[in-house]
Image: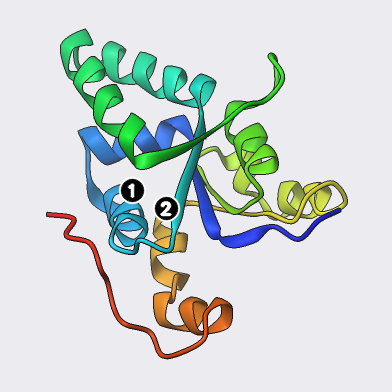
Amino acid sequence: MPDADPTRIVADADVLAAELLVGGPAREALDAVRAHSWLTLVASDSLLADAQAVITTLADADLAADWRACIETEREAVDHPDGDHPGLASAYNGNAAHLLSFDDGLSSTGANLSLQGHMNISIRTPDAFATLFDAEALYEAVHDGTYPGPDRDVS
């Protein structure tokens, strides 16, 4: 089992929709990713389609289509077999070390432990990720040199 890349992050469909429609911890977590060019948001087409469907249901199709056009430029696309859980499959096939989800079944300690035999992944709620994420420590662990700070404007 290859080591997952701690600079690669997947946000499940519920987190992507909440980031747009609610803000709060979902936006805080994804803003931390967007603020650093050396971090990568990974998502399959299937994952984005799920999020787009949620946004369409909770808001409207025009907003969902506009969101999809924007997120397409922010994410790194990955493929996975049909029928796989889009968030987990995006993380596995995209070599991501982090999956952000509001799904209690995925973010539970038991689920995290059961997946460790198959993939190196940390599944957390957006608020837990935002609380624990330390950009400086991660940068210094994976790059030579000192942390330069955020290098993208997320406003």
Q: Is residue 94 above or below residue 70?
A: below
- Label ID, residue 6: none
Find out whether the residues at labels 1 and 2 contact each other: C-beta distance under 8 Å: yes
Q: Is residue 28 above or below residue 66?
A: below
The residue sitting at 33% across, 48% down in the picture is 26
Q: Is residue 65 above or below residue 21?
A: above
Q: Where is mark 2, residue-wise?
A: 126
Q: Name the element at disc 2.
A: helix
Residue 31 location (% of width, % of height): 28, 56
The residue sitting at 86% across, 53% down in the picture is 1
Between 92 and 55, the residue placed more toward the observer is: 92
Residue 19 location (% of width, % of height): 28, 41
Q: Where is mark 1, residue-wise?
A: 26
The residue sitting at 51% across, 51% down in the picture is 9
Q: What is the three-letter code of the residue carrying label 2?
A: Pro
Task: Give the image quarter of residue 67.
Answer: top left
Between 55 and 70, the residue placed more toward the observer is: 70
Q: CA distance from mark 1 to mark 2?
A: 5 Å
Locate residue 112 relative to residue 17 in the image: left or right.
Answer: right
The residue sitting at 46% across, 61% down in the picture is 129
Q: Mark 1 or mark 2: which comes first in sequence?
A: 1
Task: Give the image quarter of residue 116.
Answer: bottom right
Task: Give the image quarter of residue 5.
Answer: bottom right
Q: What colour scheme does the image use? A: rainbow
Residue 91 location (% of width, % of height): 62, 42
Between 58 and 13, the residue placed more toward the observer is: 13
Q: Name the element at disc 1.
A: helix
Residue 150 location (% of width, % of height): 27, 71
Q: Is residue 155 above or below residue 76?
A: below
Q: Residue furthest bottom?
A: 146
How crowded is the residue under tag 1: few (<14 C-alpha within 10 Å), some, or many (20+)? many
